[in-house]
Amino acid sequence: MTARLTVQGLTIRLPQGADRENAIEDVSLTLNAGEILCVVGESGSGKSVTASAAMGLLAPGLSITAGALDLCGEDLRNVTPDQWRGIRGRRIAMVFQEPMTALNPLMTVGAQLEEMWRVHLGLDTAEARRRALAALTEVKLPDPEGALRAYPHELSGGQRQRVMIAMALALEPEVLICDEPTTALDVTTQAQVLALIKDLQVRHGTAVMFITHDFGVVAEIADRVAVMRLGQVVEEGSAQAVLTTPQHDYTKALLRAVPALAAPVPRTLSDERVLEVRGLTKTYASRGVFRRRRPVRALDDVSVSVRRGATLAVVGESGSGKSTLARVVVGLLGADGGQVTIGGAPLPTQRRAAARLVQMVFQDPYASLNPRRRVGAQVAQGPIAAGTPARQAMTEARELFCMVGLDGDAVDRYPHEFSGGQRQRIGIARALAMKPQVLVADEPVSALDVSVQAQVLALLRELQQRLDLSILFITHDLRVAAQLCDEVAVMRNGVVEESGPIGAVFAAPRSDYTRSLIAAIPGKALFGA
Amino acid sequence: MRAARAYLRSPAAVIGTVILLAVVVMGVGADWFYPGDPLGLAGRPLQWPGQNPRFSLGTDSSGRDIAAQIFHGARVSLLIGFVATSIAVVIGIAIGAVAGFYGGATDTVLMRVTEAFQTLPNFILLLVLVAVFGSTIETVTIAIGIVSWPPVARLTRAEFLSLRTRDFVQACRVQGLSDVHLILREVLPNALPPVIVYASVVMAVAILLESALAFLELSDPNVPSWGNLIGLGRNVLRTEWYVSAIPGVAILLTILGVSLVGQGLNDALNPRLARAR
């Protein structure tokens, strides 16, 4: 085994005033030819900083203070910007998380790909085109000829990521760095892209550094694993060893936090259906003068119901209509047809009346709180608008803060003083402040790190038992659904494909789509099905 | 607090604040520095600066003290700038907020009105307004405010359009809060920083517009404004150019001060943009 990329005792200093002194500290990693090294860690662990140092793309303000960085024995620390341009793309290539922002929206895919050969190797247009076509064929795009002429927005997310991979591998680099390349993709697409990366890596003998936060993905793809925490490598070893016999406590905790895909023990459920959705339809109409867009059926005759004190998971990939369903149920969107009933009565159209019946927890904890107002006021304002005296509402807000595991005095602080998990707790407190009959949670944990995710799910479960909450839980992640939910409805293209008790659906899925969803979950073999 | 510290760290902001403060002191202390009517006859006309120790900046063609007019004129210019900007910002925010928040037909109607105002060159519109309603200092100020609001409205609307769909606004809808609460308490505070920065541009333009009116002798001749002084100097521009040049420099410095303060505010309120520059 020859070492392609070696990182030796690398320390990178953060600008003054950051939460710690060094972004990464004394990090040593070796990336050998023909292997996939997974660098795993939660947000802020320094895994992306390590990758950008290897690409010579450190953000301004960061500086290497100690250690060495070698590419096939060549020192990368004192490379000039001109020399970097020769190294990047040709010897080290990178695939980014979000393919839409990594591609130029105004250039066709073909033109962007051909640029690689024209700029780096000086090939003529015809030869570059021939190679681009071959590259797109290799990454298994369904219509390579058409894709060459397409603009990035005309491709799906998975197809764009395939183009990015083709582009990264165009010049046969010695090292490929993948920074969370599948995080933005649906689970079935993710499985395909992972298989593709693995396949190409074997065929080209590339050394791949794969950065991820998802242990399922690690289990699928890694030869070796390095676990990072707060800028340090806490554990490194073969994938088999790290995943099955972890040594460090942090690795053990992370692995424990990965939810198993085992349905929870069935509970006896109430027969009373507190939320009933019947025959809901919603079409996003076509608009625009010059181009007629196809109307999108976001909801097509959707019927689901939530029992009192129970949780219904609505599972589906992006574009399945699950978020539209959530927004219609809380009254943020009007439906074209069908009915939403809560506690036996139709959902009132008046905002204030609906607020007492149904509340929502949002996906992004950073976007769902107003950055310029104190969090306590944001929790208490709903009850105050509904007629609760201000002082009583603030007292209740303090109690709610304690209930969701925060300090009661935190009500006087601003959102930026809280971490993502804490903000999500505030979001839950805000929803509970209205004492709703139904809580709609739209992907409440998908923006959180896996250990924080586990804590928030545990909180929701505890609150459900304490307050007899009925929850409509929207998620793309079957594992998360399995943690909390009693029943599940699988959605695809606006249609409910399958629904029933979660144990039954997981054990014996009736629809092909559900089966493919379950099959695509990464790391199934390791974490149990 | 953080914004205040960032503001004071920017050299542009500090220089701008000093210039602006100096102009404010001139305006506020005008009666104390130069008591009596600045438009009253003071001495022999057209004395060059330094020629007579009583008139440090000389006298104009009617024999009035230029220094006294500059000090009293600072008051008028600042007042016009400030009041006209307030008018423009209030109208602009109200129209922009409603258009951006509600969208749809409301937005279309309000934006067509805004565009109608914008397609007219605003100085021509100002001339029409002054011609119709007369040129007292009050009508001039209000007219300047009325011609200056459309860009503020467009800016506010753009901010509202992007903010109104944010999760925190949706969360407040779900909490059952009224539209008035959403607009005033949730969206507006987040939309305000770029509007405040733009207000400094409006203020600079307002001062210039008044001067331009005065140069055409269409502003209120009964107040000692800088523009009036420039207008008076026009007839003797080739021989006694200082009569126009001195108020010109005063206008230049004031607008420079306002712009620098605006840039400082921009750096302080949009720290990400400032760092990128």
Image: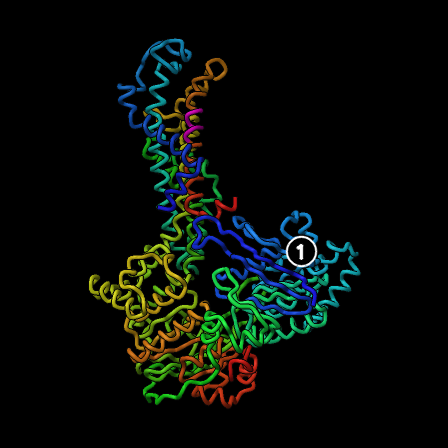
Q: Which residues are magenta?
A: B249-254
Q: Nearer the viewer, residue A32 or A505?
A: A32
Camera-nearest residue between A271 and A54: A54
Residue at image location 76% in from the left, 55% down from the top:
A121
Q: Residue A478's spot in the image, x, y percent?
A: 48, 79
In the image, A175 versus B178, the foreground residue is A175
- Dominant SS in magenta: helix
The answer to whether residue A184 is visible is no
Residue A239 in the figure: left or right of residue B218: right
Residue A266 versus residue A138 in the image, above or below: below
In the image, residue B164 lies in the stretch drawn in magenta: no
Question: As shown in the figure, which amino acid type bears the numbered disc 1?
Answer: Arg
Residue A230 in sight from this viewpoint: yes
In magenta stretch: residue B252: yes
Question: Which residue: 46% across, 36% down?
Answer: B124
Give the x, y percent position of residue B100: 42, 56
Which residue is pictured at 34% across the width and 41% down the height?
Answer: B86
Q: Is residue B117 above or below residue B250?
A: below
The residue where tag 1 is placed is A88
- Residue B107 in the image: x percent, y percent? 43, 56
Question: Is A190 on the left-hand or right-hand side of A141?
Answer: left
Rendered view: A43 above or below B99: below
Quadrant location of residue B19?
Answer: top left
Quadrant where the N terminus of chain A sits is bottom right
- Secondary structure of the residue carrying tag 1 is loop
Q: Residues within 10 Å of mark 1 (few under 14, many from 20)?
A: some
